[in-house]
Amino acid sequence: MKVEFKVPESDTEPRLWVQHEQVLAMVLRPGSIEWGLRRSEMQRVDYIAGDLELFHPHEGEWVGIMNVQSLSLGIDAALVATHDGISGEVELRPNASL
């Protein structure tokens, strides 16, 4: 499992961000992030401490101003370990009904 502590960035130029593994992130302090599927569709999303976000692998998103502190967990190895004998990638799917 990969654990990463992320601090607010001073670079505000929008960039394409792609995770290469499935990541679960928890916001540690209130803040916001600008992002969207396209650079022209970026929106500000406000977070409070304790908010969770699930990022899917290989799906790029545009990210701009990011002023949140977060703890990210790469969970690919944990997902594969829970499915003994299955080869290939295992990923969680979003559930909009929650």
Image: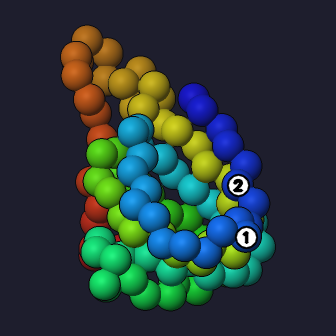
The kind of residue on which mark 2 rests is: Lys
Please give the residue where the numbered disc 2 appears in the rendered image: 6
Q: Residue at x 42, y 46 (%)?
A: 19
In this picture, residue 91 sits left or right of residue 79:
left
Q: Are marks 2 and 1 in contact (CB under 8 Å)?
A: no
Local crowd size for mark 1, using a 10 Å CA cut-off: few (<14), some (14–19), many (≥20):
few
Q: Residue at x 66, y 38 (%)?
A: 3
Q: Residue at x 73, y 49 (%)?
A: 5
Residue 28: where, in percent of width, then height?
75, 66
With respect to residue 92, does 25 lie above or below? below
The kind of residue on which mark 1 rests is: Ser
Q: Which mark is residue 30?
A: none
Marks 2, 1: nearer the viewer? 1
With respect to residue 27, does 31 lie above or below? below
Residue 41: where, in percent of width, then height?
31, 85
Q: Which quarter of the rendering shows the C terminus?
A: bottom left
In this picture, residue 56 sits left or right of residue 63:
left
